[in-house]
Image: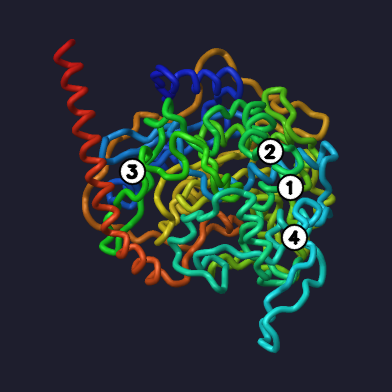
């Protein structure tokens, strides 16, 4: 069965870009089991029907081609707007790989070095203090400077607010609040505080990538959004990727949902009421969690990495630079990584902006043998709204997933349904070789003007029903790092209960918007 796709309006133009650039391939030609891929859609629909997700969409690429895609449920349940491939979602921490690529572009251009001290770009970070955990004195001097490499690796000694790898943090919901007025005030505030750990001694998820956003600003004399747009998003034709959603695209911006203590899926951020990412750029441009995008756009970025730094004849990064990103850069003494109680296995380390998982324990991996066409393992990183992706060099596969549900408590949808389904669909090796340093980005073409990709793309538009199915929480081996687990879910649920009054106002706004939409539809039908 071939994918039937009604290409109209903006969505049609987006699809044309995929077909004319990346191209499509049937699951059979990609050596994937079509029926097993279709079961992913069925399983996602079940989660939507059980009110575990508002809606979801996923894409599968192999040999550099789009092989399968589908969507279920809604980007806006209250207004019955279906989830689609061009739905704009909040990436949250999935922002970090994009910013890491931006830093590597600056490195290739000779504008920074990975061993540059942070104080070179903000002098107040020159003589930092570190909290003294043996309590003999409040702080001790830092043993060395924070470097750009520390920031890329989350080894700078920084933490996150909101109880998220921050020993002095508050409630989990605070991670969604960015109280800083600008990058400048953020950096000044951060420099005045002691580090939690000595630089280079501990891996802790942190504000590091927001600090890298400031570094981009200082080096380029541009705001991070402008510079990333000009040097990464536009060259990759990621036209729906930015730090905010303009009025012209607001109807494609998804509602953000969460689960109440009573296991009811409710909206917490509606597009037109989003205080940070609707209509205009925010004053604080968060390079750790502030970018919005679509499956189409992010797929182009991830394919560029899988192709060794090039896409559609446009080279963004040198192959050797991708090699640097696509390897474990942490000392094995810092493993396993601990992300709020979820520890990685010894096959998984940290590259630049994402986890890197190898087929064997990392102490035995010689990364110098796994470069160019010989890259091994998989990379990926998700966001707090359960968006996610993984690229596998060994299988020449890219899998992307989009939804908008605050990822606590967590149904491990991406790994247990999407990734596992794709891995079980593999029936043979990829029909191409991964491009090496000198090779073409794509050397296997199926561009005959026909969309060969599988999937119905019909959006089943179903939700409702009561109850929640038990969802396994143990990830597939070697794929850690794409979700996280709160160690104390009771704290989160208690903080959610305190927000109920705000939700009532949001629901009233949604009802009013729904009635207005219905009225317009009725008027249009009458005129017709």
Please tell me the numbered disc located at residue 325: 1
Q: Which of label 4 and label 2 is nearer to you?
A: 4
Q: Residues within 10 Å of mark 4 (few under 14, many from 20)?
A: some
Q: Which of label 1 and label 4 is nearer to you?
A: 4
- Residue that label 2 marks: 305
Mark 1 touching mark 4, by CB under 8 A?
Answer: no
The Cα atoms of the two marked residues, 3 and 2, are separated by 30 Å
Rendering quarter of residue 72 = top left
Q: Quadrant of the N terminus?
A: top left
The local secondary structure at tag 3 comes to helix
Please tell me the numbered disc located at residue 26: none
Q: Which of label 3 and label 4 is nearer to you?
A: 4
Q: Residue furthest bottom?
A: 136
Q: Residues within 10 Å of mark 3 (few under 14, many from 20)?
A: many
The Cα atoms of the two marked residues, 1 and 2, are separated by 9 Å
Q: Nearer the viewer, residue 147 or 442?
A: 147
Q: Earlier in the sequence, mark 1 or mark 2?
A: 2
The local secondary structure at tag 2 comes to helix
Q: Earlier in the sequence, mark 3 or mark 1?
A: 3
Mark 4 touching mark 2, by CB under 8 A?
Answer: no
The number of discs equals: 4
Q: Which of label 3 and label 1 is nearer to you?
A: 1
The local secondary structure at tag 4 comes to helix
Residue shown at the point (63%, 33%) measured from the top left: 226
Residue shown at the point (58%, 55%) measured from the top left: 479
Q: Which of label 3 and label 2 is nearer to you?
A: 2
- Residue that label 3 marks: 45
Q: Residue furthest left?
A: 526
């Amino acid at each position: 069965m071939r994918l039937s796709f009604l290409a109209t309006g903006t969505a049609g133009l987006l699809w044309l870009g995929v077909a004319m650039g990346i191209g499509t391939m049937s699951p059979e030609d990609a050596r994937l089991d079509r029926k097993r891929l279709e079961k992913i859609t069925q399983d996602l629909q079940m989660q939507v029907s059980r009110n575990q997700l508002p809606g979801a969409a996923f894409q599968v690429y192999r040999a550099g081609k789009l092989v399968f895609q589908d969507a279920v449920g809604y980007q806006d349940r209250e207004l019955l707007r279906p989830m689609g491939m061009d739905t704009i979602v909040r990436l949250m921490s999935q922002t970090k790989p994009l910013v890491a690529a931006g830093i590597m572009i600056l490195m290739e251009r000779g504008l920074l070095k990975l061993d540059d001290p942070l104080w070179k770009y903000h002098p107040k970070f020159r003589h930092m203090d570190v909290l003294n955990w043996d309590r003999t004195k409040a702080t001790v001097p830092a043993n060395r400077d924070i470097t750009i490499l520390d920031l890329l690796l989350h080894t700078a000694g920084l933490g996150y607010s909101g109880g998220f790898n921050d020993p002095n943090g508050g409630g989990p919901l605070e991670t969604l609040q960015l109280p800083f007025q600008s990058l400048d005030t953020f950096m000044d505030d951060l420099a005045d505080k002691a580090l939690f750990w000595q630089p280079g001694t501990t891996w802790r998820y942190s504000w590091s990538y927001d600090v890298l956003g400031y570094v981009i600003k200082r080096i380029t004399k541009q705001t991070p959004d402008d510079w990333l747009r000009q040097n990464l998003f536009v060259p990759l034709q990621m036209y729906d990727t930015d730090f905010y959603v303009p009025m012209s695209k607001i109807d494609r911006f998804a509602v953000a949902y969460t689960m109440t203590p009573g296991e009811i899926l409710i909206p917490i951020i509606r597009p037109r009421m989003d205080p940070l990412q609707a209509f205009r750029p925010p004053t604080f441009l968060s390079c750790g969690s502030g970018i919005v995008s679509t499956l189409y756009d992010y797929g182009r970025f991830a394919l560029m990495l899988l192709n060794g730094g090039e896409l559609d004849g446009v080279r963004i990064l040198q192959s050797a630079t991708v090699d640097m990103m696509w390897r474990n850069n942490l000392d094995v003494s810092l493993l396993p990584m601990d992300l709020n109680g979820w520890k990685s296995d010894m096959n998984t380390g940290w590259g630049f902006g994402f986890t890197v998982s190898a087929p064997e324990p990392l102490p035995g991996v010689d990364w110098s043998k796994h470069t160019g066409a010989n890259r091994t393992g998989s990379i990926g990183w998700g966001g707090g709204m359960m968006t996610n992706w993984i690229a596998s060099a060994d299988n020449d596969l890219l899998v992307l997933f989009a939804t908008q549900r605050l990822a606590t408590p967590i149904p491990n949808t991406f790994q247990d349904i999407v990734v596992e389904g794709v891995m079980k669909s593999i029936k043979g090796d990829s029909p191409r070789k991964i491009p090496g340093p000198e090779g073409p980005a794509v050397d296997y073409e199926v561009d005959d003007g026909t969309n060969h990709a599988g999937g119905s793309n019909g959006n089943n538009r179903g939700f409702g029903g009561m109850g929640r199915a038990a969802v396994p929480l143990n990830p597939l081996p070697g794929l850690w790092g794409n979700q996280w687990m709160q160690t104390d879910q009771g704290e989160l649920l208690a903080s959610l209960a305190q927000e109920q009054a705000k939700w009532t106002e949001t629901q009233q706004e949604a009802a009013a918007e729904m009635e207005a939409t219905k009225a317009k539809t009725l008027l249009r039908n009458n005129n017709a």
